[in-house]
Each structure stands twice: as C-alpha cells, then as structure tokens.
Image (cartoon, grey):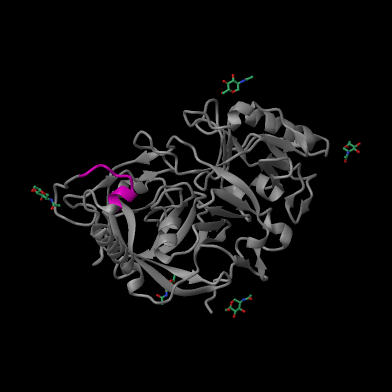
Amino acid sequence: MASTIQSLVFTTLLLFISIAPSFAQQSFRPKALVAQVSKDSSTLQYVTRISQRTPLVPLNLVLDLGGQYLWVDCDNNYVSSTYRPARCRSAQCSLARSNGCGDCFSAPRPGCNNNTCGVSPDNTVTGTATSGELAEDVVSIQSTDGKNPGRNVSDSSFIFACAPTFLLQGLASGVSGMAGFGRTRISLPSQFAAAFSFHRKFAICLASNGVVFFGDGPYVLLPGQDVSESLTFTPLFLNPVSTASAFAQGDPSSEYFIGVKSIRVNDKVVPVNTTLLSIDNEGVGGTKISTVNPYTVLESSIYDAVTKAFIDEAATRNITRVGPVAPFDVCFSSENILSTRLGASVPSIDLVLQNENTKWTIFGANSMVEARDGVLCLGFVNGGKNPRTSIVIGGYQLEDILLQFDLATSRLGFTSTLLGRQTTCSNFNFTSN
Ligand SMILES: *[C@@H]1O[C@H](CO)[C@@H](O)[C@H](O)[C@H]1NC(C)=O
Ligand SMILES: *[C@@H]1O[C@H](CO)[C@@H](O)[C@H](O)[C@H]1NC(C)=O
Ligand SMILES: *[C@@H]1O[C@H](CO)[C@@H](O)[C@H](O)[C@H]1NC(C)=O
Ligand SMILES: *[C@@H]1O[C@H](CO)[C@@H](O)[C@H](O)[C@H]1NC(C)=O
Ligand SMILES: *[C@@H]1O[C@H](CO)[C@@H](O)[C@H](O)[C@H]1NC(C)=O
C-alpha cells in the first residue's frame, strides 16, 4: 500500500517535471497556432516559416504533410545556447522510435555529440535519407484566435533531427530543412498539441500565400468566413508499412491515406481495377495525400482510364486537344474553354469516398494547369506500373481547399474549393491585432 502511494507520488512528480519546462515561461496558453505557407515558384514546393534556437532564427522549411518530424541543416551556422542533443535511451529517443546510439568523432557541435541517439532524416522530394542526431531546441510560433495572429509562443523542448547540408539538395532555395506533419508522436502537430495541451488537429490551406493552423478551428478567411464549419469528413487509414526512404522493420507509414472507392468523370464511373485502391499487406496500393508531389500521380492503368474518360467528355464540348506539354500528356486549346469562378469549365472529376454521397470533387481550378499561353493541360501525371501507392493526390489539387487532419480520431475534414465561397487560402488576415 505504502509503496503504491509512494510510486504514485513519484509518477506525479515525474509528470510534473516533464511538463513544467513548456509552461514555465508563459502563463498564456494558446488555443491554436498559425504559420504562413508560400509556394516556391521554381520547385512548386510549399514553404512554411517558424523560428528556432536562442537567439531565435526564422527558418524557411518545406512543408511535408506526411513527413515524420522537423529536420534542419545543422552543419551550416547552427548557433544556439539552448541546443540539447537527445541522450541515448532517453524519453526523446523512444518518442522518435530510435534504437540507435552513437558517438561522433570530431569536435562537438550541434549534430555531433557523443552518447546520442540517431534517426534518419528523409528528404522526401528526392527520396534520400541519411543519419542525423536527434536533439531539442526552442521553437517559436504565432498563436491565433483563428482570425488574426496573436502573440508568439514557444516550446522550449521541441524535438527535431540534425541533418548534413547535402540533404537540402532538391529543396527550394533558402530553406533550412523540412517540417514533417505526419502521423508520429514528434511531428510538428503532435508536439505542438502536447506542449500547449490543445486538440491533436491541424489544418492546411495551400495557395501561393497560404496558411497552416495547429489546433482546432475557427479557421477564418477574409471576408470573415469560418471555413471549419463546412467540412466533409472521411476516415484516414494507416498504412502498416513505412513509406519513408529508410525505416526499421515494423514501422508504419507516417503518411495520410484516404479510402477512394471509385472515380467519376462528369458523374460517369471510370472503370478501374479496385484492388489497386486498397492498401495490401505489404503496404502497396491505396490513396495518399502529399504536399511534396506538385501534381496528382496515378498508377498507369488508372491514369489511362481517367484521361480517356476526360478526353471523351471534353470532346462532347468541342474542346480541341493539342500536343503534350511536359510533364503533362493531356492538353487542350483553351479556345473553347470558358472560364468560371471554379476555374476552367471542364468535366469534373470525383473521388468517391466511403459512400456515394461523400466525394471529393475536382473542378477546373484544381484540374487544369496553364502549361503555356493558350494551352490548358490536365494536371495529372502517369505514375507507371506497380508504384508503391496507386493514387497520390498532389499539391495543385489541394490548393484553395482547407484540409483538417484529426489525429485523435483518424479523420480528415475537407472543404470543396473555397473559390466557390468567394474566398481563397491566401485570405487569412496575417495582420496582428
Ligand atoms: C567522443 O568520444 C571519443 C572517444 O572518447 C572522442 O575521441 C571524441 O572526441 C568524442 N566526440 C565528441 C563530439 O565529443
Ligand atoms: C513573432 O513571430 C513572427 C513570425 O514568426 C515574427 O515575424 C515576429 O517578429 C515575432 N514577433 C516578436 C515580437 O518576436
Ligand atoms: C488488379 O490489380 C491487382 C494488383 O496489382 C492485380 O494483381 C490484378 O491482376 C489486377 N486485375 C486485373 C483484372 O487486371
Ligand atoms: C461543336 O462543333 C460543331 C462543328 O463546329 C458544331 O456543329 C456543334 O454544334 C458544336 N457543338 C457544341 C456543343 O458546341
Ligand atoms: C485584418 O485584421 C486587422 C487587425 O484585426 C484589422 O484591423 C483589419 O481591418 C483586418 N483586415 C481586413 C481586410 O478585414
């Protein structure tokens, strides 16, 4: 009895100690956080901005929706008085699922310390992973009431991975790493939710000048629309096999998968092999959402079926097909294509989800890309035979749509195109109160 009480007291004390650092400096507790996301026009990557270190340094980071955690280049000018490497077998190492433990044979500096655990930071744009030291440092970000940014708040023990400079190859110029928003315990949304005790939810709204929210709504876009009130929900599926470039056996994927059951073009069902639409035991197949693929990628038989249906439907509208413009095969003269509030007036594409009434409809603004003057191409690319994932919904198809990920209930909420409600993802009011 006595020992039970003693161990209870001890556990409570431990809990208190481990929670205390995050709250110590601030009595203000934010309900949600906000950050900008801009699109890099040369790489088509989405770049977000948060601050790290002491003194704080603003960092540009490629937003990686399915990425495992934050990784930054520590080789180049990492200066911080609050950098702490994660010691072997510490709680940080187990949160990161790291079993490795190592030493570093050169002068100590951030990214090179003895008796630390290692992880495998992954450049998911190029599919390159390397080894890196796990560490903690201060991260600062703006709080929000959902309408405007509020005061800045910081998490003094934010876990991330240190990577060598070469891992930045292939990323937008001026970035220092990647910000992983995936389904792990140390992704940005998970750590912020734990540090500030809010809902394990986040939302992304991509555009040339978009926004990301950590925490629950309201998510208000000018002129005063709370778009968190118009979400359609669909379950998120866990892929049991990691999709990372390097991983340990038994690791699940940190990416977000949804259950597309069928595809329609202009309300007509497109014949596809439905086996490809589900995730098999080896983790192959299914549909994921990705911010590192600029355009939706379809397995080749699905690609052929969808593009054929689209071309046939377009033909009934007298839309003239023209030659391909890389990376797109299916292009049209814009001559006979009307433009509407929802973009080019072309056949709509529906991704039908858990039932016939739950569908993600892709209108012209998200399907047609102006590849050259006077030429509009269907913004989908052929993923070849036997890709790991049959459908990868890419960035262009996500723009001006708000997507809310609920990690606690494994549920995705999505709006239809915000252009239909006369707002866009560039309409968050970043002016502080
Ligand atoms: C780690 O330990 C080794 C052996 O004791 C030593 O040579 C090396 O300098 C140390 N590295 C760091 C980064 O402290
Ligand atoms: C708060 O954070 C924003 C964005 O990270 C930054 O631009 C601003 O300078 C910060 N404000 C203060 C008072 O530190
Ligand atoms: C459907 O796809 C599965 C998985 O690739 C394949 O094994 C099967 O042969 C395909 N069925 C047809 C009818 O092509
Ligand atoms: C398509 O073009 C043909 C020939 O130019 C014309 O006869 C027909 O009415 C047009 N159809 C539509 C739907 O515009
Ligand atoms: C943006 O927010 C600021 C601060 O609340 C406010 O003064 C301004 O009017 C808002 N802008 C618009 C266009 O509503």
> Quick check: 338 above or below 8?
above
> Quick check: 410 above or below 227?
above
- Quarter of the image for residue 419 reads bottom right
Rendered-image quadrant of the C terminus? bottom right
Rendered-image quadrant of the N terminus? bottom left
Q: Main secondary structure of the magenta part?
A: loop
Q: Is residue 400 left or right of residue 30?
A: right
Q: How many dots with numbers? A: 0
Furthest residue in direction front, as rendered: 1
Residue appearing at x 63%, y 67% in the figure: 221
> Quick check: 73 above or below 267?
below
Furthest residue in direction bottom, as rendered: 433
Q: Picture coordinates of residue 131 (x, y %)?
A: 28, 43
> Quarter containing ligand 3?
top right
Relative to the observer, which residue lies in front, 180 or 73?
Answer: 180
Residue appearing at x 82%, y 38% in the figure: 318
Relative to the observer, which residue lies in front, 408 or 328?
Answer: 408
Q: Is residue 185 left or right of residue 390?
A: left
Q: Which residues are magenta?
A: 92-101
Residue 255: say if magenta: no
> Quick check: 59 above or below 118?
below
Residue 93: say if magenta: yes
Residue appearing at x 28%, y 65% in the figure: 13
Q: Picture coordinates of residue 274 (x, y %)?
A: 64, 28
Q: Picture coordinates of residue 6 (x, y %)?
A: 24, 61
Residue appearing at x 52%, y 58% in the figure: 202
Q: Is residue 164 left or right of residue 217?
A: left
